[in-house]
Image: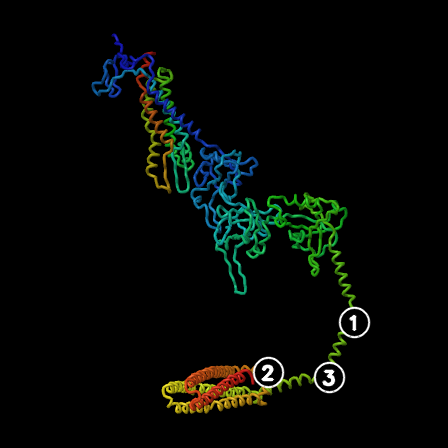
Amino acid sequence: MIETAKSAGLAACTTCARVWPHDQARCDRCGSPIVDRDRRGLQPVWAWWFAGLLCYIPANIYPMLRTKTLLAYQENTIIGGAVELVAHGSYGVAAIILIASVLIPVIKFLSIAYLALNIRDRRRMSQHSRHQLYEVVEFVGRWSMVDVFVVAILSSLIQLQDVASINPGPAAMTFALSVIFTMLSAQSFDPRLIWDSEDQA
Amino acid sequence: MSIPEPKIVGPKDKGSFAYSLIWLVPISALAISLFVVWKTYNDRGPLIEIAFQEATGIRTDETELRYRDVTVGQVEKLEFGEDLKTVIAKVRVEKSIARFIDADSQFWLVRPEVTTRGVSGLDTVLSGVFIEGTWDATIAQEPDIFTALPRRPLALAGELGLQFMLFSDNGKGMVDNAPILYRGREIGRIGNLRLAGDGQSIIADAFVPFPNDRLITSSTKFWDTSGFDLSFGPSGAKLNVSSLASLVSGGISFDTLVSGGRKVGSGAAFQLYANEGEARSNVFAGPTRAGEQLSIVFEGDVSGLAVGATVELRGVTIGEVTALTGIVDEDRFGDQSVRLLTTITINPGRLGIAIDEDVLDFLSEQVRKGLRAQLTNASLLTGGLKIVLVELPDSPPAELNRNADPFPMLPSTDADIADVSATAEGVFERINNLPIEDVLNSTISMMDSATRLLNTDGVKEAPDEALALLGDARRFVGSDGVQGLPDQFAETMENLNTAIGDLRGIAATIAEQEVIGNLSRSVEAIRQAADDASLAVAGLPELVETTSAFVKKTSDLPLAELADDADALLKSIDGITSQDSARAIPEMLNTALDQLSSTLAELRDGGLIENANKTLDATNIAAGSIADATTRLPEIVARIEDLLGQAESTLAGLDRNGPLTTETRATLREIRDAASAVNSLARTIERRPNSLLIGR
């Protein structure tokens, strides 16, 4: 039995982690409002999660990069680009792109969904493990932006008019949105809910 | 230990089941996505299918469809046709333009092309090939699949202009994309060269865009200007190069050589002549098109018929023989003998058949009415044959066999050669029967007689004598006497001139001798004397004496001698002219007139005529002077008479019977006599010059 703040009649500031009596309205240390358990619960998580997923679909269908050189015009989707890199033998770069743009977002979606769905189920995974998973998801989410940064940097660097130019495709925008939405989704997940299940059990 | 119930703040108070506003984010995202999907689908144009022979350079999702160089579509998919003979490109076309793509749309692939006419499609080197399409602004049903053209069509859909065909036997000068030149300017192009269905000529499509299409009428002639034309003529060598481009790649020029051509519609066909001269010589050939080929089988011997022999209808050449070959067809003719299969080409334009009418229909109808092909002599001299389409309404019925191989079969009738040769034979027979031998014999004997006659001495000498005669004549003309004639003649005329001069001097003397003045003066004196007499009778005797002296003086004037002189002069002139030598001149002139022509020229040059003219002028003037003088003589007489009248009246005032009176009367009578003498002189002079001038 773990002694939680809630069971102790306390509530932690979500900003600076200082615990206050749960009737405290505002954190005296940092000024943030003290919110105990959000009444809305997992709604924001799911809302952002769906928005992120919606954006992730076109991000993979539409081209991420539009490369125009003197002789050719090329459009690459995320996976198409990675496949092409593999075909050219750049396995490393292909792996980075695949991990950052495909693997991490997919894992994120799955993890958040898993955490949100099994918030009260501790049989499959201990609360501690789930909290660690949450931490990892939150930490790693921002790295998905690697692909977006690559596109942004390339498009701003390579603009040689007719000779060669790289422009972001519509997928770049939706992918960035997807990443942002999943990060927001992860952030709106209140990890304290993981531990709340202890009480009800 | 009591656990205080945590105090829940915030939304908990708003209700037990509150939806977070955050749900708006995924909902709006979904809405936007759905809207984008719907819009994309809605804006997506139709997919058209274009069949290509080969998809050179076409790439999926890359190759564009362009209309007037604006991208209006993109190839989405490439696949093979069902029989693997074509490549079908599925092109997504923009919705806004797709509705114009209908059955008359044309598509072709644009790729870089380097030809003698230049480089085209250079932009596709970098960007890759693209499909170009053309269609007009009408909206019509879209077909399932389009077939791409191998190259750009001559006329884009909806382009105004005249599309027509050119055909030529050898295709010389016909090159795809060759220019049509008019006065050196390119106004159109030809293309789509192909062999005619019968394999006899080469056909090309030609297009001349508006507004130059009005230059082409039914009487327009086209000729090939490719290469250069070197000709030698009276003005030297002539090199004719139309343009460098057409020198390399061919070119076609045209001109409407006669006026009055009708406007031609699309699809008209024109013959392409090898050069301008040929085109000009076919000015009246009418608008032509590929000839209609027909076969004719002739029975019997047709030696003399050759390829190129004419085919005539009522004397008008409407075609020619294009091939001759034997044929053995037991099924058709019932035996195994060889027949002559003649292939002729009929020019429908020469028949006056409209371009769009079927020649075979026309001919079928004519054959039913009795039109038959007949061999006949083209020329009696060379023995060549020609084919004549004759109308024989009584001939056994026959049909134009349109299914015959290789060409429709025109029925023939018996040749018309035998009659002609029979006639020729008859002519020759008659010539043969002519008594040529006799005629020749007679001619020979006549020639012999002539020879004999000519060989006699007299005839032989005749030319010599004639020569001698001519020599004599020449000698006569050249003799001093004849040569001197002109001089003598001139001398005579000179004498005549002098005589006339003398005559003129005499006349002048008459005019100048102051006879008139003297007379006037004496008359004045008489009048004075009369006046005096009226005053003093005593002075009268002197007056009378003076008067009588005057009258005497007057009568002493050498007028009579003058008249004699003139007479003598005229006589001497007469004598000169009546001399024998002078009289002989005309005869001599007459006898030698022809030979003297040169001499006469000399005479003219020697100024003889001028002399004669001058002389005659002088004579004329002299005669005029004489006439002048004579006209004044009667005046003198009148005045004398007047004077006498006065004197008489004066005397009448005096004593009628006095001695003075009688004397004075006598004086006056004398004066009157003198006056009548003068008068007679004047008449004589008046008569003489006339006789001198008028005759001898």
Task: Decide which of tag 3 and tag 2 comes sooner along the chain.
Answer: 3
Which residue corresponds to mark 2? B595
Q: Amino acid at mark 1?
A: Asp
The spot of residue B412 in percent (x, y) is 72, 49
The spot of residue A178 in percent (x, y) is 36, 27
- Tell me how far mark 2 sits from mark 1, CA to CA: 48 Å
Of the numbered discs in the image, which one, if any, rests on residue B456? 3
Question: Which SS class for mark 2?
Answer: loop
Q: Chain of mark 1?
A: B
Circles 3 and 2 in contact, beta carbons < 8 Å: no
Q: Chain of mark 2?
A: B
Q: Nearer the viewer, residue B9 or B389?
A: B389
**Quadrant that contains the N terminus of chain B:** top left
Residue at x 43% of width, y 39% of height: B70
Single out the mark in the foreground, 2 or 1.
2
Task: Decide which of tag 2 and tag 1 comes sooner along the chain.
Answer: 1
Does B133 sit above or below residue B118?
above
Q: Are marks 2 and 1 on the same chain?
A: yes
Q: Amino acid at mark 3?
A: Thr
Question: Which SS class for mark 1?
Answer: helix
In which image quadrant can residue B418 be found? bottom right
Question: Which SS class for mark 3?
Answer: loop
Which residue corresponds to mark 1? B438
Question: Is residue B152 visible in this depiction of the protein?
Answer: no
- Tell me how far mark 3 sits from mark 1, CA to CA: 27 Å
Position of B136 with respect to B25 (left or right) is right
The spot of residue B14 in percent (x, y) is 30, 13
The spot of residue B431 in percent (x, y) is 76, 65
Q: Nearer the viewer, residue B603 or B689?
A: B689
Q: Nearer the viewer, residue B548 or B43?
A: B548
